[in-house]
């Protein structure tokens, strides 16, 4: 086993780092519940064809980034690269819409994409994902966006930018894609090899290019906003009007096309300046044809996902929290039995208690109590044993008092539980 390391692009979330993760998960449960979302947990692996059909075979995610393997029976399985496709499968398979025509669900968990790892980009990462089915009205888009931003705020992220676009639908987008492709073909010589390839496979993705030499050309390309059908145009105008009404600020970006093919109409991303190159903390949009595409009824959907690693990077650093309320420092071996009884009683009273079992000296035990940020250290040495008391030391104030053994548990409960 010597030298075994975590797989490239994966990372451990260590006990000292878990605080903000709990804050994120608690905020999700609290806030999403208020908007009528209930938690769903779907498997981390699914049949490969779910993602190929759901996300799109020509997307980077499906064509380059999936962890796909053959099961022993020959079926092809894939570790989920995102949550939406699996949730849609589950909603269809379990007929969730029979009992509720507009189910709202959220999920928290790991996703897997074989991307080039860098700060904020991993091969196993985590998302908080929310999906709302069965509603077409623009006000639902607005409510979903409001929830997304409210969630970031509940996590303490103050500075971010909401970026919005409409990518049209099956009626108007195909014609726009052809217009775009024609414009790109006319300039093929000025495009990178990647963009040349995408001109044929998925021209919308060229709009995403960060290559400096392509920026001037891309800025002059036909814009989807000028090619929307009346329905998509009206829908997006109404979404923007309602966002204005609620005082939600956003920037329109005609180049926001997103990396998944299921989107129609509204798409959005939230970026944070705190993040560097991988600055998208949240992405989402409407996917009205997806449920039908995956074999379900023709039911619309809209949702978003937040990358937890990126969210945590954008959150203000939290104060380290205390690991225990009471540290029991037993300095006389004869006191250990009594300490075990006291420890259990204190824990039953709801206090977090740790004690030394190895008979370390006073100095080393006080050092440990300090490290654990214990609120009080309770000492039992030969002198205390002889007097039938414990020394209760307030760690922050460095003050101490003697408390009778019989009163110790009550005393600490009163002092620390209030
Ligand atoms: P996405 O934009 O691919 O959308 O991912 C959403 C978020 O997940 C990103 O904004 C980012 O914070 C995080 N993320 C993505 N890839 C990585 C990575 N390799 N490392 C770290 N974080 C990452 C979706 O996944 C859609 N399913 C969102 C959605 C839900 N649309 C509708 N419903």
Image (cartoon, grey):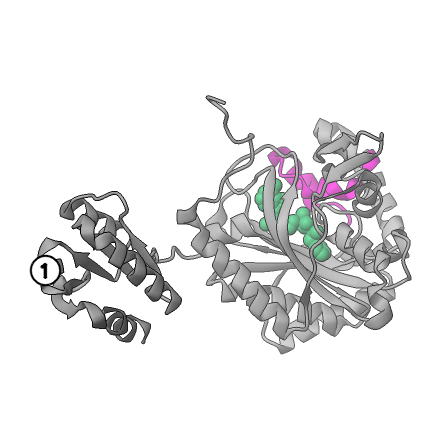
Q: Position of residue 109 (x, y in %)?
A: 62, 51
Residue 208 magenta: yes
Rendered residue at 61%/64% (across/down): 148
205 in the magenta segment: yes
Tell me residue 133's x, y (percent): 79, 65
Instruction: Tell me which corner region of the image, top left, top right, bottom left or bottom right, holds residue 192.
Output: top right
Q: Is residue 166 left or right of residue 16?
A: right
Magenta stretch secondary structure, dominant: helix
In this view of the protein, which residue sits in the foreground, 391 or 190? 391
Figure quadrant of the C terminus:
bottom left
Of 200 and 64, the residue lying toward us: 64
Residue marked by disc 1: 386
Q: Which range of residues does the magenta coloring cover? A: 200-223
Q: Is residue 129 above or below residue 407?
A: above
The correct choice, above or below, for 221 with respect to 99 in the image is above
Residue 233 shows in this picture: yes
- Is residue 267 in view from this perspective? no
Does residue 88 appear left or right of residue 118 in this picture?
right
Q: Does residue 113 sit above or below 410 in this rendering?
A: above
């Amino acid at each position: 086993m010597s030298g075994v390391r975590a797989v490239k692009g994966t990372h451990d979330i260590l006990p000292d780092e878990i605080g903000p993760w709990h804050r994120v998960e608690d905020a999700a449960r609290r806030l999403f519940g208020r908007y009528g979302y209930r938690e769903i947990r779907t498997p981390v692996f699914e049949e490969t064809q779910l993602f190929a059909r759901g996300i799109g075979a020509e997307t980077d995610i499906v064509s380059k980034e999936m962890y796909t393997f053959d099961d022993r029976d020959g079926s092809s399985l894939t570790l989920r690269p995102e949550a939406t496709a699996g949730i849609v499968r589950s909603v269809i398979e379990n007929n969730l819409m029979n009992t509720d025509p507009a189910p709202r669900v959220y999920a928290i968990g790991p996703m897997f994409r074989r991307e080039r790892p860098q700060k904020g980009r991993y091969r196993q990462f985590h998302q908080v994902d929310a999906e709302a089915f069965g509603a077409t009205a623009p006000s639902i888009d607005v409510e979903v966006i409001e929830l997304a931003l409210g969630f970031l705020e509940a996590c303490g992220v103050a500075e971010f930018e909401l970026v919005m676009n409409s990518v049209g639908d099956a009626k108007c987008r195909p014609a726009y894609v052809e217009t775009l492709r024609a414009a790109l073909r006319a300039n093929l010589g000025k495009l990178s090899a990647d963009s040349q390839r995408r001109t044929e496979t998925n021209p919308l993705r060229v709009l995403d290019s960060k290559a400096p030499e392509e920026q001037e050309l891309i800025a002059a390309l036909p814009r989807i906003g000028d090619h929307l059908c009346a329905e998509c145009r009206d829908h997006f105008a109404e979404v923007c009007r309602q966002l204005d009404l609620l005082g939600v600020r956003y920037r329109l970006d005609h180049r926001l096309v997103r990396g998944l093919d299921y989107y129609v109409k509204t798409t959005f991303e939230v970026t944070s300046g705190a993040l560097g190159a991988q600055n998208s903390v949240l992405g989402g949009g409407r996917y009205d044809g997806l449920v039908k595409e995956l074999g379900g009824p023709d039911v619309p959907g809209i949702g978003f996902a937040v990358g937890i690693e990126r969210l945590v990077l954008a959150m203000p650093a939290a104060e380290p929290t205390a690991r225990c309320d009471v540290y029991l420092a037993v300095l006389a071996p004869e006191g250990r039995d009594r300490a075990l009884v006291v420890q259990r009683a204190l824990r039953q009273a709801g206090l977090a208690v740790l004690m030394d079992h190895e008979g370390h000296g006073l100095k080393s035990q006080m050092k440990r109590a300090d490290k654990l940020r214990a609120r009080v250290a309770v000492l039992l040495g030969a002198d205390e044993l002889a007097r039938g008391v414990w020394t209760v030391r307030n760690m922050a104030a460095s003050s101490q008092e003697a408390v009778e053994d019989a009163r110790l548990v009550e005393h600490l409960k009163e002092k620390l539980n209030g």
